Each structure stands twice: as structure tokens, then as C-alpha cells.
Image (cartoon, rainbow, N blue to C red):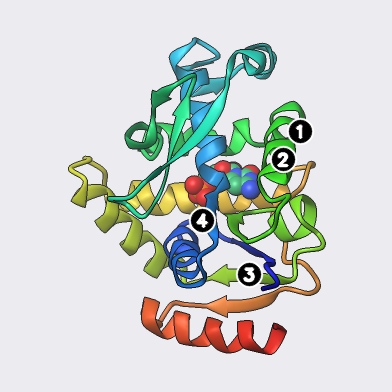
Amino acid sequence: KHRIIIAVDGFSSCGKSTFAKAIAARLGYIFIDTGAMYRAVTLYALEHGAIRSGIVDEEAVVKLLDRISITFRFNPERGASDIYVNGDLVEGKIRTIEVSNCVSRVSAIPEVRRKLVAMQQEMGRRRGVVMDGRDIGTVVFPDAELKLFMTADTAVRACRRYKELTGKGMSVTMEEVERNIRERDKADMSRAVSPLRQADDAIVLDNSHMSVDEQMAWFMNEFQLKM
Ligand code: C5P
């Protein structure tokens, strides 16, 4: 059977990962969360002095890059892969508001993108992957057979992310979450290297008022049209 690459790009906190993971489970494909990779580099930079008081020292981040080895290992309980940095499981540490507040500055560094994009291309070499991020359909796999661009109302997104974070016991306010989403969208769209933008051949999905089941029904229809 012919296996393809499905690129899922879009704004922050639109449920890209949730949806991409569900698609991968449905099709028996591998799900790759590229945001987790940028977050893992950011966490490492925070823990190794390359980010202090929220200020990102770009040169220091670039110097750390050779010391960062990112790997994924499938976790059957989550039905997705956990991310490891130099063999340490960091899955539970990369979604804090501290990491979220710095990740867009780290992901704008060209050397960081070069390293992670090369890894992502290697992971998709045999096709059969659903990859979610910001530049998958435009830069990582411009030849992806199916490209989705996800969006939702900012208030809906903030509410979802707030529930997710507080549900994990993190203490954040709705204002903080909404500010972070707006700032990341703006930074991700306006950076010089691989800015977030919709690929010309992407299909837009606004899921503000859709359940995951409804999104899946929509997706299977699009998928069958392609195959
Ligand atoms: O997807 P997630 O919100 O976890 O991504 C975190 C950040 O990583 C984004 O705000 C963006 O700055 C960066 N990112 C990126 N390119 C990707 C995936 C994520 O620049 N392909």
C-alpha cells in the first residue's frame, strides 16, 4: 500500500498534536511532534545557562547544539512517542509556560532550524508519517501529499490550553496563556527563517467548533479523495 506524508501546520494550541496523533493511529502511520523538538532544545538551553531571565543568548544556544541529541521512543500508554534529550526523558518538562515563553525565540535561530529540519526529513524518509509543526508543508516536506493548515479562534485556543495546563497541576492564568498564544503566533509568522504560513496547496481546517470525531470524519473524506 502506498504510504504518504501528511503535514499538519498551523497556529499555536489549535489541537494539531491531538489531531495528528489521532490520524496516525487511524492510518497506522508514525506521528512526529516537531514542536516537541524545538521545546526540547529550549529546555536544554534554559538548563544550561543559554537563557537567563527570559533573555535568549543566541550564540550560547548555537554552541550547545552539538551537545544535544534528541531521540524518540514509543510509549504505548500515550499512544505516541516520548522525547528524550541525551537519553533523559523530558516529555513532562517541555510544556511549561517558561519553555513556551522562550521557544519562539529559540526556533527563530537558523542553526537550530537547520539541525532539526534535517532530523525531521530523515524521520520521514520512508513516508507513512503525520508530522505536525509550523513549516512542515512549506520547508520540511514541500512535496507532502496531503497538507493541512489548522486554525481556531484565539479565545477557544486559550481556553483549551488553559484546561490542559491546569489539568496537569500547573499554575497559570488565562491571561498568561492567551498572551503567550498571541505572542507565539506573531513571532512564528514574522521570523525571517521559515515563517509560519499556509502552503499554497494546504487545506484549511478551522476547528473552533468541531470535536475530534468531527475533524476525523472531515479528514478521512479528504484523505480518500487523495488516495
Ligand atoms: O507545536 P508547539 O506549540 O509545541 O511548538 C512550539 C514552538 O516551536 C512554536 O511556537 C514555534 O516557535 C516552534 N516550532 C517551529 N517549527 C515547527 C514546530 C514548532 O518553529 N515545525
Q: Amino acid at mark 1?
A: Arg
> Judging from the image, what secondary structure is the residue with disc 3 in?
strand
Beta carbon at label 4 within 8 Å of ligand 1? yes
- Return the residue at label 3: 149
Residue 222's image quarter? bottom right
Q: Residue at x 71, y 53 (%)?
A: 126
| 3D distance between C-alphas at marks 3 and 2 | 19 Å
Compared to 125, does 216 lie above or below? below
Q: How many marks overall?
A: 4
Q: Which mark is residue 117?
A: 2
Q: Nearer the viewer, residue 23 or 137?
A: 23
| 3D distance between C-alphas at marks 4 and 2 | 19 Å
> Judging from the image, what secondary structure is the residue with disc 4 in?
loop
Quadrant in which the C terminus is drawn? bottom right
Of the numbered discs 3 and 2, the one sitting upstream in the chain is: 2
Q: Which mark is residue 114?
A: 1
Residue 226: percent from left, percent from top: 71, 83
Q: Is residue 223 left or right of residue 76?
A: right
Q: Residue at x 38, y 69 (%)?
A: 156
> Judging from the image, what secondary structure is the residue with disc 1 in?
helix
Q: Amino acid at mark 2?
A: Val
Task: Look at the numbered discs 2 and 1 and tell me whether their residues touch, using CB distance below 8 Å.
Answer: yes
Compared to 191, does 93 lie above or below? above
Of the numbered discs 3 and 4, the one sitting upstream in the chain is: 4
- Return the residue at label 4: 12
